Image (spheres, rainbow, N blue to C red):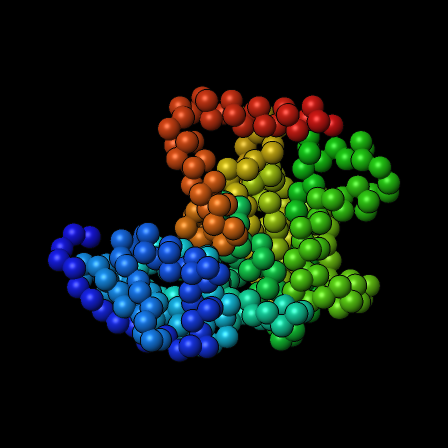
Amino acid sequence: MAGSIIELKADIPVNHQANVFGRFDEHLKQIEKTLNVTLILRNGELKILGNEQAASAARDLIANLVALSEKGNAITSQNVNYGLALALESKSGMLTEIDKDFICNTIQGRPIRPKTLGQKDYVDMIRKKMIVFGVGPAGTGKTYLAMAMAVTAFRNEEVSRIILTRPAIEAGEKLGFLPGDLQSKVDPYLRPLYDALYQIMGADSFQKNMERGLIEVAPLAYMRGRTLDNAFIILDEAQNTTPAQMKMFLTRIGFGSKVIVTGDASQKDLPRDAVSGLDVAMKVLKKIDDIGFCELTSKDVVRHPLVQQIVQAYENYEKKQPKKEQADMQRSRYERRRNFR
């Protein structure tokens, strides 16, 4: 962003300055560093010094952060980092557009919304399609947003029940080494699904609906032989299914149901040389109109900013590895897990 230095101004209401600036002005410092501008606050007015393109991008971003703050949002590092990524693509205005897409509130009253363009596309696709595959790295909100959409559909009586499942995969679903009865054995694999539901609908509501059979959390093996009508069904960790399991699951779907399949192709825990049912399904089903595919990337990671850097670093590293070494890495991870047993 080369060019002569100009000065622009941005008005930030006093009651929103702390939120927009961040603790110890961390948000302003990040904007200065990324866009190569200088930000100076004097008498309630923020001066922006930089070349025309950079200064304009900073002003637009700050205006959007103020707009988010005025709507009651707590401005986070994720908001700022993603806003900077959009600013570099001249898309700063999309921050407020994304914020308009409300899904539901958590039990604590915190609004759940998509936070990136990829997440918004994912949510829009869930609304439009009967079956949606949400694929991407850890921290992109694949499961959490699907859960929020499921709870919203359930509350609005669009479906009569929620069914959550995932493969209890550890050396081919051989769970005998775990203590307790069958439910105790599979609960550790389903814990992330429980945690998300507790946060969105509360433990009491979750337990009551579980007891009434309106919410079911079960390993994938329990789906065999069933027909699932009028339900919102989420298959999590789908990269750990076999092609036969995936076919079995997808053919359970009945009338009035919606299905979300989530997975991360880079985190397979299948035995060596096993083919992932998720990979096969995305190839086989890509031409069916009422099935949508949304591929999230490291840009859509909404956990701690360091997670985004970690995901990106691994993606860059794996792209440089020959295919044989990638397969060896996969086998090594599987063997480590197996030896841990």
Q: Quadrant of residue 322?
A: top left
For the C terminus, the image quarter is: top right
Q: Is residue 268 left or right of residue 181?
A: left
How many numbered callouts? Answer: 0
Residue 160 seen from this side: yes
**Residue at the outermost front position:** 43
The quadrant in which residue 83 appears is bottom left
Query: Which residue occupies the foreground of this view, 211 or 336?
Result: 336
Q: Residue at x 44, y 53 (%)?
A: 300
Residue at image point 68% right, 30% down = 171
Residue 41 on image: x %, y %: 33, 68
What residue is at 54 percent from the left and 28 percent from the top? Answer: 330
Q: Position of residue 222 (x, y in %)?
A: 74, 48
Can you name the residue that lies furthest to the left here?
4
**Residue 334 left/right relative to 214:** left
Residue 243 position in % (x across, y down): 57, 38
Q: Is residue 335 above or below residue 79?
A: above
Q: Is residue 168 above or below residue 152?
A: above
x and y percent of residue 146 in the render?
57, 59
Is residue 280 among the parts visible in the rendering?
A: no
Q: Residue at x 61, y 40 (%)?
A: 241
